[in-house]
Image (cartoon, rainbow, N blue to C red):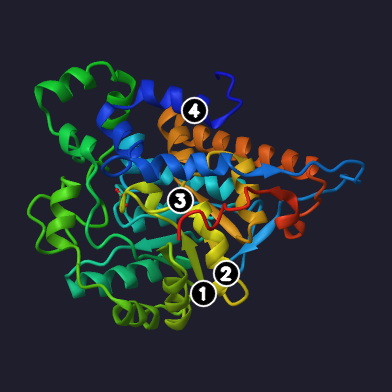
Amino acid sequence: MPIITEIEDLKRLYKRRVPKMFYDYAETGSWTEQTFRENSSDFDEIRLRQRVAVDMAGRSTATRMVGQDCKMPVALAPVGLCGMQSADGEIKAARAAEKFGVPFTLSTMSICSIEDVASHTSKPFWFQVYTLKDDDFMKRLFARAKDAKCSALVITVDLQVLGQRHKDLKNGLSAPPKLTPSSILNLATKVPWGLEMLQTRRRFFGNIVGHAKGVTDPSSLSSWTAEAFDPSLDWNRIREFRSWWDGPVILKGILDAEDARRALDVGADAIVVSNHGGRQLDGALSSIRMLPKIMDAVGDKIEVHLDSGIRSGQDVLKALALGARGTMIGRAFVYGLGAMGEAGVTRALEVIHKELDVTMALCGERSVAGLGRHNLLLPADFADRWS
Ligand code: GLV
């Protein structure tokens, strides 16, 4: 196995192994990608306060997210098309998360279905829903998630319409990939990926194909989101979904203090401060920069998680020190999945865990609950530069 010391190592291997169309799908933001870039670069503006001579024996990264014990405050975010990054990718990622002791979230836009993942894992996972116009489909989706014993529902609230990602349009992104002269040329350089894909029957959007009506080309993400997604999703509808699910509900995609208060009003158990990894509203501020204001608005009333831009355990620590109870990683685990399947996801989790653990120690903290603003050095205008 190659020596992997940081998430960037996995990304290099991932780029070599996986067809360009799927690498680009993950490694993209919308339009100019400003928000995508700033999600990560804004973490670099935050510095850490070194403390010494604190007894670090017996420290722990363990915590709870929506009532669930976790080895560290990091969940795998819902990511579409994981089964195109590696054959049966959602099953592999779910297994890695289960063995490591962190939550896995299955996306509506997964290749492996809810039932597939449930039958290949032994612990409950979280399920993410997108809102389709087809109401029967939605009711069945909730029932399927319940039958699969999913332990939390993650409702994504920032994607009624899809942000434009230039690369996906230029590559003709689809699952499975459509054969065109340029995709064939690229696939010819990805033989191990192709051989693996030939051995699985899971190559379509498993939660959609055969389940949703009104989808004319279910292989194309952009066309079926445009046709099938419900652009009228509003807070009343979210409240209705809340009443359909009797476990914890997490609203993902909150980037504004006012929306965070609305999330509280509709009875969410947690929110994920997120701009969808910079894939939706280009020009929005990064999640980490918005976190302080959202914490001020609702931090004492609801569990707040953060995603978008996390590539290291140090980033996780910074989010926790600004008040988040937990975090989600998307690309950081997808790099591992594409690079080395289940072992790659495990390696990504190990890297982040070690970085978090060592950084906590060097900051003089023995537990994640002890982390706080006192661990950070921030530019004076970090949260207020734009108003
Ligand atoms: C879907 O969630 C996407 O961002 O592509």
The CA distance from mark 2 to mark 3 is 19 Å
Residue 95 drawn at (x, y percent): 50, 46
Please name the residue that numbered disc 1 is placed on: 269
Side (left or right) of 87 relative to 231: right
Side (left or right) of 335 relative to 239: right
Dot 1: few (<14), some (14–19), or many (≥20) neighbours within 10 Å? many
Q: Which of 205 and 77 lies nearest the eye of the viewer?
A: 77
- Specify which label sits upstream in the sequence, 4 or 2: 4
Question: Is residue 147 positioned above or below 40 on the image?
Answer: below
- Specify which label sits upstream in the sequence, 1 or 2: 1
Q: Using the rendered view, name the quadrant where residue 227 is placed.
A: bottom left
Element type at mark 2? strand
Q: Is residue 199 visible in this depiction of the protein?
A: no
- Specify which label sits upstream in the sequence, 2 or 3: 3
Q: Which of 371 and 291 lies nearest the eye of the viewer?
A: 291
Question: Is residue 378 positioned above or below 347 on the image?
Answer: below
The CA distance from mark 4 to mark 2 is 31 Å
Q: Are marks 1 and 2 in contact (CB under 8 Å)?
A: yes
- Specify which label sits upstream in the sequence, 4 or 3: 4
Q: Are marks 2 and 3 in contact (CB under 8 Å)?
A: no
Please name the residue that numbered disc 3 is placed on: 286
- Specify which label sits upstream in the sequence, 1 or 4: 4
The CA distance from mark 4 to mark 3 is 24 Å
Q: Which circle, 4 or 2, is nearer the viewer?
A: 2
**Given the image, on which type of amino acid does mark 1 rest?**
Asp
Q: Which circle, 2 or 3, is nearer the viewer?
A: 3
Dot 4: few (<14), some (14–19), or many (≥20) neighbours within 10 Å? many
Q: Residue furthest left?
A: 216
Residue 248 drawn at (x, y percent): 50, 73
Please name the residue that numbered disc 4 is placed on: 10
